[in-house]
Image: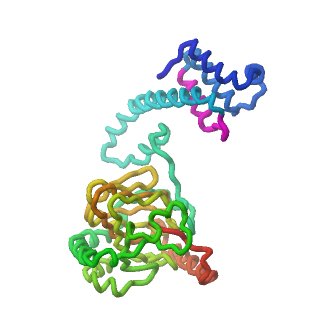
Amino acid sequence: MLALGKSAVLGLLNVIDSEDLRIRQLVEAMEPGDFRAMLQTALHHEGLGETRAAAATYRTAMQAIPKFLSPALRPVLDHAKAVVDANDGELARFLDERLDPIRARHADAPLDRVEQSRDILLRRRRVFRPQPSFMYVPQLPAIEFYDRDLFPWLDTLEAATADIQAELTQVLAGGPEALEPYIAIDGTPQPRWRELANSRRWGVFYLWRAGAPVAENLARCPKTARALESWPQCRLEGTGPTAVFSILDSRTRIPPHVGVNNARLIVHVPLVVPPGCGFRVGAEQRSWEPGKAFVFDDTIEHEAWNDSDQPRAVLILDCWNPFLSAAEREMVTELTAGVSDYYGDLPGYARGAEG
């Protein structure tokens, strides 16, 4: 733990006091959450050697930083962060001494949720929540990557990986014209999509598109089409079912974004994955492995990148969230269809890009 000497404490207190010469007289009258008062209280704790109390107060103060912060307070803030970081390191070691015997006793038990809670407490993991751009179904779990065992039908797709790869190769042999931009936008795109708008750097080949099969493309990929027969389709007006070959060009990034509806999830079946490719959903990052599918909630912020010098290819499709009942699925299908029918062809309720 960082510990300041008396002279250093006084020096940082003087930085605060120089912002308001009467601050010592005003501290008693300040609200408990006042930013400068909390910094001063933390510095006094340090001066007394109460480093844990200082760290706890600094942490609270750092959650209440004013929108307009005087540059003169920057040294105090930098010091506060260093104290909190050092305290988190000590707290991590303290907690692990308590948790290690439990981990050993339950080595075969799933403890991921509590381990993630520990990392959040220690500020090693951010909390991300679903933020769908169109429809939010409450009380569904906010899970970044879902347990693979919830989707046994993926076995058929994974078993067909070699055939799917071969058919993708034939499609790509037709050159870039075989693909279309995933971000196809008329007019001015959102800033995040400016680089990828109407560009084949993120190109796609649709097998199913927004609820309808693309017969010509499925005919070009008959083995892929047969593998997709095992896929329990998610029927959502204007968005699903969708199945697509997604090709991310070399040295290309898909910026952080969210999908449209947490009633459905997104499946990735990796096909071609050169080194240097990665994927993040919320606070969790994964690499693709050809033939190893995973399922994630795309209404949680996610992004992808290809830092290699070769294209990356993934088969992407959607499916129902397994925590929805059959009746709820029917309701969601009718809700989305109702919104679509109400607005008709009006562009104003467009549901945004998916990933």
Residue 61, given in percent of the width and then of the height, sits at 62, 33
Q: Give the overall secondary structure of the magenta segment.
A: helix
Location of the C terminus (image quadrant): bottom left
Q: In this view, does 295 lie to the left or right of 169?
A: right
- The residue under the point 49% across, 71% down is 325
- The residue under the point 50% across, 65% down is 259
Q: Is 303 situated above or below 82?
A: below
Residue 6, given in percent of the width and then of the height, sits at 57, 12
Quadrant for residue 35, please give it. top right
Q: Is 31 situated above or below 336?
A: above
Q: Which residue is nearer to you in this view: 36 or 191? A: 191
Residue 53 among magenta residues? yes
Q: Which residue lies furthest to the top in this view?
A: 6
Q: In this view, does 191 lie to the left or right of 109?
A: right
Q: Is 5 situated above or below 249?
A: above
Q: Is 120 situated above or below 33?
A: below
Quadrant for residue 204, please give it. bottom left
Residue 116 among magenta residues? no
- The residue under the point 77% across, 20% down is 25
Residue 126, given in percent of the width and then of the height, sits at 49, 46
Q: Which residue is nearer to you in this view: 288 or 227? A: 288
Residue 330, given in percent of the width and then of the height, sits at 52, 78
Q: How many marks?
A: 0
Q: Which residue is nearer to you in this view: 113 or 6? A: 6
Q: Magenta residues, as a range?
A: 51-69
- The residue under the point 65% across, 19% down is 14
Q: How is the image coloured?
A: rainbow
